[in-house]
Amino acid sequence: MIVKDIWKRKREKVWLFLELIVITIVAWVVIDPAVVNLYYRSLPIGYDTDRLIYIEGKALYNGTVDRDAWDVAFEYLPKLINRLKPLDGVENAYCHKSPYSTISAKYYSNEYVCYEQDTITLAWVGFTSDCNFFETYGLKPLSGSPSAEELSRIDTESNQAVLSESGAKALFGTAEGVVGKHFQRFYYGYKGGEAHDFTVAGVVADVQKLRYSAVQSIIYLPNDSRGMGAYIIIRLKKGINPAKYIEEHAQDIQQTAKTDFFRINKIMTYEEFIHQEELEDKKPQEVNTNLTLAIFFLINLSLAVIGTVWLQAKLTLAIFFLINLSLAVIGTVWLQAKRRTEECGVRRTYGASKLRLLFSFLTEGALLATIAVVIGCVIYLNYAHSGFETDGIHETFKMYQGNYNPGPESDLTWVNHFWPHYLIVSSIVYLIILCTVLIGTTIPAFKIINSKITVALKD
């Protein structure tokens, strides 16, 4: 019955139908990046950043940065850590030798690792041996792994590595019983480089490498490389606010670390450090732009409700379609519903209830929206699928992953697989279009079915 009614009015419905198909394609393009970014931002980071403070220091010689002075300052770092730990409110402290080693650093490299002829990539995080890395960050070893203190003491000569839970699953297919297993690591940062045998020293719970990606497959390796500065992480005791602690104790920290060849020049909360890394990588601007476009699109899609009921169909289609395709949807639905006032009057004289008439309006709109969205998504499917590589990762998603190119078994989320990603976003688009059409149908429909029968027949 509903399908027959739509078919009888095919000339009236064709414009709305075409609009909905175009709107579906536009909605996919606009809403997809916003949905992906919101999903990434919703992932738990995996360690308590609200108890961490980030500090940067420089090696000095005659008041300037000097590489030779850093060789002297480097020997001072273990003493520096031991001097910071007794400070009031400090639970632990750790010092990175390189800015690239911090877990949330925007720049990082991939490590190629191999097990039983399968080679995958894992995100690399380096740590200074015997400097409280795992316990300071609060990384949690899984059952069967050594304690955080023991993992922090691994040195470069042992050829041992610590894997995240996702990293272990990517390499071995499981995170259980992998401690002591052997694998190969390719040196020089590329597949085919010199391979060395490594042993899994332990497995720790997943953390989110970057807040704008789902990268959790990580390999933690002891690292002896030196930079020109020190990058210190302080872990505070429970209940202490990092921002307030910095206000009250920044001077104490600087005085404690101060020597003739070393100065601290930056102190901030770890949350501020993460935000700064994102700003420098232009990710917040990208996220905000995507969200703004999505919100603007949704608002415009709804704005057509106001005043459109009084416009003629041709004017609605001419103006709204050219200015913003989305504005025409509700307006067109509203106008088409208004033109059915006489029909509703006739049906009511034959005993049709108001509820039945409203249900008829909504069912027609829902069916039309459903068919249009299916066609629109199928049209977009051609374009979407052409941008995906054989490993199932869309090329436009790489910007969310940074320079990390996960293997086919690593970091498995719906975002990284074509069909789950396509179906989830298509469902969201469908719900938005459906709600828009139903709103645009319900408002004028209520007015029509509640009007006097004599007035409806006169119209």
Image (cartoon, rainbow, N blue to C red):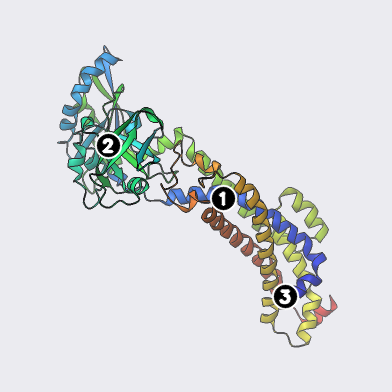
The residue positioned 31% from the left and 21% from the top of the image is 228
The residue positioned 74% from the left and 88% from the top of the image is 351
Q: Quadrant of the N terminus?
A: bottom right
Q: Would you name the residue on which mark 1 appears?
A: 32
Which image quadrant for residue 10?
bottom right
Q: Would you name the residue on which mark 2 appears?
A: 198
Q: Would you name the residue on which mark 3 appears?
A: 2
The residue positioned 74% from the left and 61% from the top of the image is 17
Q: Secondary structure at mark 3?
A: helix
Q: Secondary structure at mark 1?
A: helix
- In front of the other: 422 or 88: 422
Residue 89 seen anywhere in this rendered image of the structure? no
Question: Are circles 2 and 3 on residues that touch, CB within 8 Å?
Answer: no
Of pointers 1 and 3, the one earlier in the residue sequence: 3
- In front of the other: 225 or 312: 225
| Foreground label between 2 and 3 | 2
* Residue density around tag 2, few if under 14, some if 14–19, many if 20 or more, within 10 Å: some
Q: Secondary structure at mark 2?
A: strand
**What is the distance, in whole Å, between disc 1 and disc 3 at their CAs?**
32 Å
Farthest front residue in view: 117
The residue positioned 48% from the left and 48% from the top of the image is 416
Q: Amino acid at mark 1?
A: Asp
Q: Amino acid at mark 2?
A: Phe
Q: Amino acid at mark 3?
A: Ile
**What is the distance, in whole Å, between disc 2 and disc 3 at their CAs?**
67 Å
- In front of the other: 174 or 123: 174
